[in-house]
Image: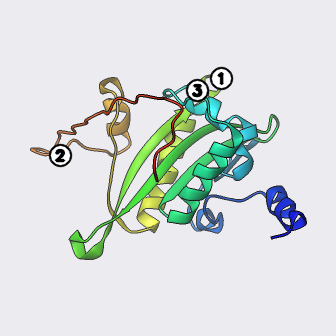
């Protein structure tokens, strides 16, 4: 590929998934805010700083961001929704749907809700409920047989208010965390 072609590719902003999928959903319109897929240039729109309001992100440079973005895009299993404030051109809310391919349930797909966060300056405007409702619609559209999540105990009533349920005799979610020797090291994927 020539350097001109590479520069053209670099200048082209890429969506994580085709935004026409969102056109098929019943989305609320909110003045001054844009609901859309994560884009390759959201590194500059505060996406990682927003995630840092949820959990530790680390010191991710643009190249690392773009490499992970393209890996996620290439799997076709990641649907990261963002809400952008069009006045500030900053990402102010996000949620992720990860679609897992299964052999069970006639080769069905299962959804996982991940990384729900609203910028602290925008909380109280129901944007968290909005991004979750979008993920719910998207899960149904993609025909997930279920959507699951894990959250902090104090958030259980919030998610239950949106229709999530703790299933009897199936309400245990266990984790095993692996210590990292070097927090700057990338995975081997």
Decide: few, some or many residues near mark 2? Use Cα within 10 Å; few <14, some 14-19, many ≥20: few
Q: Could you say which is closer to the camera, residue 60 or residue 154?
A: 60
User: How many labels, in total?
Assistant: 3
Q: Is 143 on the left-hand or right-hand side of 185? A: left
Residue 27 image position (x, y, % from top left) = 59, 55
Q: Could you say which is closer to the camera, residue 3 or residue 129?
A: 3
Residue 43 image position (x, y, % from top left) = 70, 41
Q: Is 9 on the left-hand or right-hand side of 51? A: right
Q: Of label 2 and label 1, which has the lower sequence position?
A: 1
Vertical placement of residue 154 versus 14, above or below: above
Q: Quadrant of residue 118?
A: top right
Vertical placement of residue 162 versus 73, above or below: above
Q: Which mark is residue 37?
A: none
Q: Badge 2 is on which residue?
A: 167
Circle 2: element type: loop
* Residue 28 shows up from this direction: no
Q: Badge 3 is on which residue?
A: 123
Q: Residue furthest left?
A: 169
Q: Are marks 2 and 3 in contact (CB under 8 Å)?
A: no
Q: Which mark is residue 121?
A: 1
Q: Could you say which is closer to the camera, residue 4 or residue 171?
A: 4
- Quarter of the image for the N terminus: give it: bottom right
Vertical placement of residue 153 versus 60, above or below: above
* Residue 74 shows up from this direction: yes
Q: Are marks 1 and 3 in contact (CB under 8 Å)?
A: yes
Q: Of label 2 and label 3, which has the lower sequence position?
A: 3
Q: Is 31 on the left-hand or right-hand side of 145? A: right
Q: CA distance from mark 2 to mark 1?
A: 34 Å
Decide: few, some or many residues near mark 3? Use Cα within 10 Å; few <14, some 14-19, many ≥20: few
Residue 29 image position (x, y, % from top left) = 67, 50
């Amino acid at each position: 590929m020539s350097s001109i072609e590479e520069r053209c590719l670099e200048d082209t902003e890429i969506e994580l998934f085709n935004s026409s999928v969102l056109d098929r959903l019943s989305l609320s319109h909110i003045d001054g805010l844009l609901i859309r897929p994560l884009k390759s240039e959201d590194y500059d729109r505060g996406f990682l700083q927003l995630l840092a309001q949820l959990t530790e992100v680390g010191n991710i440079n643009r190249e690392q961001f773009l490499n992970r973005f393209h890996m996620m895009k290439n799997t076709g299993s990641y649907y990261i929704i963002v809400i952008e404030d069009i006045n500030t051109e900053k990402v102010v809310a996000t949620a992720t749907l990860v679609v897992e391919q299964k052999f069970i349930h006639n080769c069905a797909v299962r959804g996982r809700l991940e990384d729900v966060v609203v910028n602290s300056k925008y909380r109280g405007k129901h944007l968290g409920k909005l991004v979750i409702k979008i993920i719910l619609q998207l899960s149904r559209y993609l025909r997930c047989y279920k959507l699951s999540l894990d959250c902090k105990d104090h958030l259980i009533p919030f998610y239950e208010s949106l229709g999530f349920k703790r299933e009897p005799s199936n309400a245990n979610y266990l984790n095993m965390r692996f210590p990292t020797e070097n927090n700057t090291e990338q995975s081997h994927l």
